[in-house]
Image: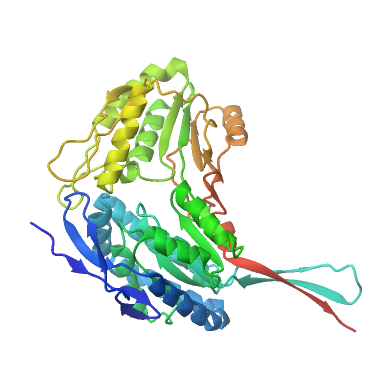
Amino acid sequence: MKTATKTYQMYIDGEFTDAASKETSQVINPATEEVISEVPKATIEDVRRAIDAAERAQKSWEKCPSSERAKYLTAIAQEIRRNADALARVISEEVGKTLELSTTEVHFTADYIDYMAGWARRYEGEIVPSDRPKENIFVYKAPIGVIAGILPWNFPFFLIARKAAPALITGNTIVIKPSGESPNNALEFAKIIDKIGLPKGVINIVTGSGSTLGDELSRNPKVGMVSLTGSYSAGAAVMRAAADNITKVSLELGGKAPTIVMDDADIDLAVKSVVESRVINTGQVCNCTERVYVQESVADVFISKIVKAMQDVKFGDPLAEEGLDMGPLVSKSALESVDQMVKRAVEGGAKVLTGGKPAGRDKGYYYEPTVLVNVDNTLANDCQYGLTSAIFTSNVDTMMRASNELKFGETYVNRESFEAIQGFHAGWRKSGVGGADGKHGLEEYLQTHVVYVQYK
């Protein structure tokens, strides 16, 4: 049965609004290829209006005690939980992830907001010794001002929290631009913040072209920091646009994550963890395992088991079928891109052991779970990226060597590749600048103000 098309408005300065141009964009369900919504196609004028609203609101929001700011965050988290089932369906419908994963994302988002609210009375400055008598040196932690949050489509709802929650608790305001492929959940989030009475202008949400809106958010002099999660090319574009104003950037970019399986590893655990880390969200996760290096003596056993496990992966329409491991890819272009990558690998000498082609359904952007061998990539560190990595071993010496020699921001040992709220998710090299989560992620949204006080 065809889904009714929904109509959304953006959220600027505490009001729901259309784009100045009155133009809209369509959002497609990747499982069915049906149009599920129309969202505003914002202009540069709309983005500037949102930035101006955030700038006005920030002056009073900063003066609000952090404990009071935390109450707003807690109220948002509570309202998210009250609407968890409906929100999960919105995410699955526009992104194509399994309903179970969407539900997990919604609750994880609420937990993340609560976690950041808990920092209200915990982040702090310092008093450092002076070289002069009768002087104190105070190191204050101050908000940056207006934050621009540019979001991807793979974990769209959680990324709202990852950018907005630390920004708000530290006294900043924010303009959020969701991905054009997954704006519906962000506009549902706007209804939540409107309902709980968040002061107008503290969170603003604009929808539309990534290149147009992202460029304005990155180069506007009223923006103090741009936080982007996305591709390397998008991150490089943000850095170039931010350079004129020396605007701070925080970027989480691509991965190319390696996993190493040693001969003393628990092979069944390694297979289970690699499959979980590969098929989650149909492999569209920055820390997904993408390359597996297996010690030769256990390679045949590992390969036979992982081929069987991938053949058992069940995929389909998340809102129409139960017991799924993954759904479709997010878009037709994503499906075409994956297909071309596999074809290039085969042309380069790789061998397909299972999968290797689009699933051939009448509708939806489905690709078969795939295993390739004989792929030419010599070392785990042999790439320009450095977000996540993993190793499976029972040898402490091997584990410690890997922990010290893998050139990645994260290394997972004997477990699936997925980060914790209280950790620090940050990439090396072309995988990013700065990071998110935990204390260090919170501090991305603060700047220091040193005050020297001489007294008589």
Going by the picture, which residue comes out furthest to the top?
A: 297
The residue at the far left in this view is 1
Tell me the quadrant of the picture where the C terminus can be found.
bottom right
Q: Position of residue 154 (x, y in %)?
A: 35, 51
Q: Nearer the viewer, residue 378 or 78?
A: 378
Where is residue 127? Give x, y as percent.
Answer: 76, 70
Q: Is residue 120 above or below residue 283?
A: below
Relative side of 435 to 280, left or right: right
Horizontally, is 453 left or right of 271 in the view?
A: right
x then y, percent, for residue 12: 38, 77
Q: Nearer the viewer, residue 155 or 123?
A: 155
Q: Is residue 115 visible?
A: no
Numbered marks: total: 0
Q: Position of residue 62 (x, y in %)?
A: 56, 79
Q: Is residue 441 left or right of residue 308?
A: right
What residue is rendered at 52% in x and 34% in y?
383
> Between 426 and 404, which is closer to the camera in this rendering?
426
Residue at 22% across / 38% down in the picture? Answer: 314
User: Is any atom of residue 29 visible in this view?
Assistant: yes
Q: Nearer the viewer, residue 348 or 144?
A: 348
